[in-house]
Image: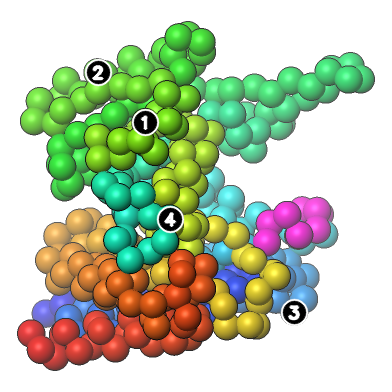
Amino acid sequence: MTSKLTIAVLPGDHIGPEISQAAVRAMSAANDVFQLGLTFETHEVGHESLRLHGTTLRDDVYQAAIAADGILLGPCDNGGYPALAEGGINVPGKFRHELDLYANLRPSKSHASVPDSRAGLDVLVVRENSEGFYPDRNMFQGYGEMMPVEGVAISVRKITAHASNRIAHSAFQWARRRRNLVTIVSKKHIFKMTDGLFYDECMKVAAEYPDVTCNSMIVDALNADLYQRPERYDVMVMTNLFGDVISNLCSALAGGLGLGGGVNAGENHAMANASHGSAPDIVGQDKANPISMVRSGAMLLGWLGARHGRSDLLQAEAAMEAAVNEVLSRADTRTSDVGGTASGSRSSQAIVDIILRKGRAD
């Protein structure tokens, strides 16, 4: 008998509810086809929660989300929230920190029909998500930036063997599911201690995976080579800031930020996020591309499938990805940001229709 799984849906801000609903509809279609036993529970977060309850993330919502089997979080307007004392909790940040979601997984793949898509690109950025140059993540107490005197600002970078080792394991495990190639990305000739430590830990882990080919690239050289020869890369593992920059570059090379899915994963929890912001300039216009959020939902099902040893969830992930690829192949089902003519709701419905049609045919 199929075990039941609960997905906590936190729609987020601005276009967040639109694209989160698109992801839920696609996941629900996969649920119908593969009889996955999914239940969706929706909770308000962000500006709507702040308006109604005085906080962007209520404690009961947080507790319900972490009790669920997975979290689907729409884009949040963190920069637009008030101070913490006034209820402005960084929603994704709280989940990331409290649940130790140390691996940010960001795939990007080219599509022949999408304008500006770079042929040959099919990569997964595995970004260390818990430390690095991000000042909100690298101190036990306090903040990792300071201004000791006027006109002088200092930012602290923290790299640990523990975090480097576990993100390397994640990268090599993912490579085994893909094309058995890992590229370690760093600036170790300049950041000799911090990137040196990261590189050394990755190489230690590489020795445990003799079936996976491993090489390394300096981050600035990688930028150019990804554009010129994207087919050379599969899984790329890197520290936090480099991963943030390179993953957006890869999304752009694939055709746009609206195409890239993403999951923040730890040992016991995973949270699916779109790879872009909340886009207040297009809210309510039915222009938002649903694909990033749909892909993130598919990745969440894949993570659950691997965690629970369930092939049906992996099949559902593949079916959702296949539907997205078919939608991208046609201008009348692609949204305008990727050279199409469809509205966001039209694109979303097309994804659902393809999942159901192919499921019935099988």
Q: Nearer the viewer, residue 192 or 95?
A: 192
Q: CA distance from mark 2 to mark 3?
A: 51 Å
Q: Residues within 10 Å of mark 1 (few under 14, many from 20)?
A: some
Tag 1 residue:
225
Rate crowding at label 2 as few (under 14), some (14 to 19) or many (20 or more) other CA atoms within 10 Å: few
SS assignment at label 3: helix
Looking at marks 3 and 1 on the same chain, the residue that comes earlier in the sequence is marked by 3
Q: Residues within 10 Å of mark 4 (few under 14, many from 20)?
A: some
Q: Position of residue 165 (x, y in %)?
A: 33, 26
Say which mark, if any, is on residue 116.
Answer: 4
Judged by depth in the image, the label closer to the viewer, 2 or 1, is: 1
Question: Residue 80 colored magenta?
Answer: yes
Q: Nearer the viewer, mark 2 or mark 3?
A: 2
Mark nearest the camera among 4 and 2 is 4
- Residue 46 location, x and y as percent? 67, 68
Q: Work out whether residue 217 can be spotted.
A: yes
Q: Quadrant of the N terminus?
A: bottom left
How far is mark 1 from mark 4, CA to CA? 17 Å
Q: Quadrant of the C terminus?
A: bottom left
Q: Residue at x 46, y 18 (%)?
A: 187
The residue located at (20%, 89%) in the rendering is 357
Q: Residue at x 14, y 91 (%)?
A: 360
Q: Please tell me which of labels 2 and 1 falls first in the chain.
A: 2
Which one is nearer the viewer's eye here, 348 or 63?
348
Q: Gap between marks 4 and 3, in whole Å?
A: 42 Å
Task: Please report the bounds of the magenta region as a residue range.
Answer: 77-85
Q: Which residue is mark 2?
A: 204
Mark 4 or mark 2: which comes first in sequence?
Answer: 4
Tag 1: residue type? Asp
Tell me which corner region of the image, top left, top right, bottom left or bottom right, holds residue 39. bottom left
